[in-house]
Amino acid sequence: MEAPGLQIDPAKCTGCSLCVKACPFGALTLEPREKFDLPESRFKRIAVVNEACTLCGACVPTCAFDALALDEIERLGDERIEDYRGVWVFAEQRDGQIQDVVYELLSRGRQLADERQTELAAVLISGDLTEPPAALGAWGADRVYWARDPRLAEYNTDYYTQIMSDLIRAHKPEVVLAGATSIGRAFIPRVAVRVRTGLTADCTSLDMDVEQGLLLQTRPAFGGNIMATIICPHHRPQMATVRHKVLAKRQLETGLEAEVVPVAADLQPSLTKILEVVHELGNQVNLAEADIIVSGGRGLGAPAHFDLLRELARELGAAVGASRAAVDAGWIPAYHQVGQTGKTVCPKLYVACGISGAIQHLAGMSSSGMIVAINKDANAPIFDVADIGIVGDVFEVVPQLIRALRER
């Protein structure tokens, strides 16, 4: 009946449903009392909270019976907040190779650190690497905390969470950034819970209120219909995961090396045992690194029509992407999806074929260098962001493009 932070008193709850209606996140439901080991009551149902609860408190004042209560949240005083200094970036690696999103985070992290007149550090958890950790200095890092152990060669949630949490407690960084990758999304929220702070996921922009020392974390909200800027005023560190390809990389400064600080990997027993690492087929479609992408949407009408886009992609040397509508319809695998719930891309050329331009899709591709949109609906939102708009039938326009490319 309760989640950490929100308590529901079964002796007072009448199952009136007012709190359920007030919850903006669908985190409260009414369940039969008989499902739980509760004292007998004349009321047949009780409110139950699930993992969607954000502790926003909207439900508490609606209860006329004082059955709901929020725990007091421990807040750091100004004196304790001043103990936190520095900007950290989680330097994600796979198969011993630093991931490209790390260079983007270090580039922006360097700017944030300079604004706060503090240092920038990277946290590296790995086995052996293909390049020395000190090379991260060329991307702006002053220091690299390196936890190195053969058991860390492959990602393990328990190990990564333990190491990162221990480092944060020991060194007290003001800001911690990580890529919104499958690894970042898996363990960084666990770290935030352990160090008792907040986390903003899937950010598309980061800024700094220098006077207040507040990280301004911007991300899509309410289904992508607005951009919300989130702050964490009472807890430290301020933590955020950031999507790949939304931050610009700085000019590489060759010759600069970061100080490497070895970190003892005193690993506690893990609940997880890695039996085998299987690289999914989606790795063959690296949309995030593609210079040219040809994407299709609901306007294609059928899965077989993606063959036309694949033909155009071959002529352009491009990767094939898709909108959520096409993926949800089962026309193309999910690892082709571009958008808020798919991949964020920033190619030199993005060709949108039969894509209307829902804001969720635009959030994933609007920073592309050149956007060409093909749609027979002249009022389609995709034309608002397109550099070149072609109002016409995809099945007439695309074959002409293919012929023109072949005749070059």
Image (cartoon, grey):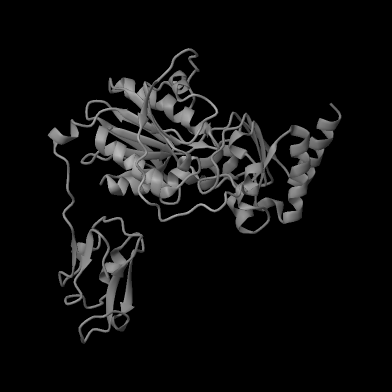
In this picture, residue 247 sits left or right of residue 8: right
Which residue lies most toward the right here?
407
Residue at 29% in and 45% down = 198
In this picture, residue 123 sits left or right of residue 385: left
Which residue occupies the foreground of this view, 252 or 383?
252
Which residue occupies the foreground of this view, 37 or 110?
37
Residue at 75% in and 43% down = 310
Which residue occupies the foreground of this view, 33 or 394?
33
Q: Position of residue 183 (x, y in %)?
A: 47, 44
Q: Quadrant of the C terminus?
A: top right
Q: Position of residue 74 (x, y in %)?
A: 17, 48
Q: Position of residue 322 (x, y in %)?
A: 64, 47
Relative to 360, residue 345 above or below: above
Which residue occupies the foreground of this view, 130 or 47?
130
Residue at 60% in and 54% down = 325
Relative to 30, residue 278 above or below: above
Q: Position of residue 328 (x, y in %)?
A: 60, 57
Which residue lies most toward the top here?
255
- Quarter assignment of residue 329: bottom right
Regarding residue 188, the answer to whether it shows in the image is: no
In this picture, residue 87 sits left or right of residue 12: right
- Quarter assignment of residue 389: top right
Relative to 387, residue 19 above or below: below
Regarding residue 14, the answer to whether it shows in the image is: yes
Relative to 359, residue 113 above or below: above
Q: Quadrant of the N terminus?
A: bottom left
